[in-house]
Image (cartoon, rainbow, N blue to C red):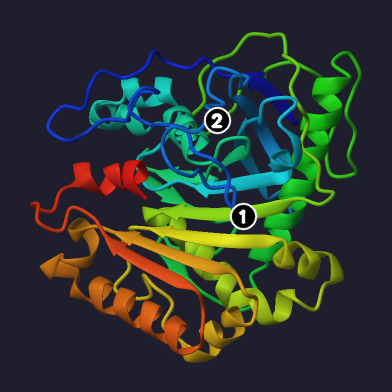
Amino acid sequence: MWGFRRLWFPPPPPPPLLGLGAASSSSLPARTMSQDGRGGPPGAPSAEGRRPRCLHLSAVPGADPQRCNELLLLAAAAGEGAEQRHHVLYFPGDVQNYHEVMTRHPENYQWENWSLENTATILAHRFPNSYIWVIKCSRMHLHKFSCYDNFVKSNMFGAPEHTPDFGAFKHLYLLLVNAFNLSQNGLLLKNRNVWNKNSEASNCKSTSTSNGSQGEKERTCEKFSPPSLNGASFTLIGFSKGCVVLNQLLFELKEAKKDKNIDTFIKSIRTMYWLDGGHSGGSNTWVTYPEVLKEFAQTGITVHTHVTPYQVHDPMRSWIGKEHKKFVQILEDFGVQVTSQIHFANETPSIENHFRVHEVF
């Protein structure tokens, strides 16, 4: 059953300790909009304080009723104009979960500043006036390893096996269609049911889930400016393990374009960000196949890569740095507008700085 609830935002985290911590609203200045919805220079008018709280959409189906994902939506503030048609889709990495789940975990509590809710807030600063969608993985092995089984064939720990026909683009597109309809109809018509051919009725009530969400009570949904696919544009962001979804989309481009609706969706993607990609597999952390990247180059999508020594300078996983360089070089050779930055290059590689890429990209 579909359901949604309003998530409680934890208090702003304290100042970073030993280099780790999500920045508060005072340390993450809002920015003006660019084409991809990204903020401009510090000092621009802030949208913070006008956004509703994060909304949790549970068990939203995509390509078929059995392939469901949970989503968080941090909606754009009402009355902001054309920028509201821009949507940021974020795929989290390992460990990242709901704040309450992370605080109760014997190990993951130390990374609670990078919970799904807090990360959505950080992204809202980076992309003011845009809708922020956090797309949760469908499975977390041992409550640590994010596994995007609905987007790419994965092993027990979430390492991918990329193919050109898994259906990731179809799943993402239909996931958004259903999530858009649910958030529109359910929140604007709070007391009516929302029906979809692949789901049961849902109203403005919380539902319990089995994938890391807390026990819930019925809550009141607040008004916000509902998202619409009409004229929408998109920015896709993968962090760490979440980059496997972006990689899978590249492998599927050629086939996905044959579907009219999905081709239209692809043409609405403005920018893609790879943030310190990595997984437990022994290769294919970055896409390095020229034929795949040539197809990608033809889309005109702008590419940004932001990495840290934690991934690209790891001597035990030396292929990651080599693949990253090859990924960037091949795209440049094909004329793609690509920027590549390494952050914290003069600091000791650490998981703290791996997470902090969210603050500096």
* Picture coordinates of residue 115, whole percent (x, y): 40, 31
Residue farthest to the front, as pictured: 43
Callout 1 crowding tier (Cα within 10 Å): few <14, some 14–19, many ≥20: few
Q: Residue at x 59, y 38 (%)?
A: 132
Q: Is residue 202 positioned above or below 136 on the image?
A: above
Label 2 Cα neighbours within 10 Å, binned few <14 / some 14-19 / many ≥20:
few
Amino acid type of the residue tagged 2 in the rendering: Ser
Q: Is residue 244 left or right of residue 183?
A: left
**Circle 1 residue:** 35
Dot placed on the residue nearer the N-terminal end, 2 or 1: 1
Is residue 108 rendered to the left or right of residue 205? left
| Image quarter of residue 254 | bottom right
Q: Are marks 2 and 1 in contact (CB under 8 Å)?
A: no
Label 1 residue SS? loop
Residue at 25% across, 79% down: 322
Residue 222 at x, y percent in the picture:
72, 14
The residue under label 1 is which amino acid type?
A: Gln
Disc 2 versus disc 1: distance between alpha carbons? 38 Å
Residue 233 can be seen, yes or no: yes
Going by the image, does 123 lie left or right of 198?
A: left
Q: Secondary structure at mark 2?
A: loop
Residue 102 location (% of width, % of height): 35, 27
| Between marks 2 and 1 in the image, the one whose residue lies nearer the viewer | 1
| Residue nearer the viewer, 39 or 233 | 39
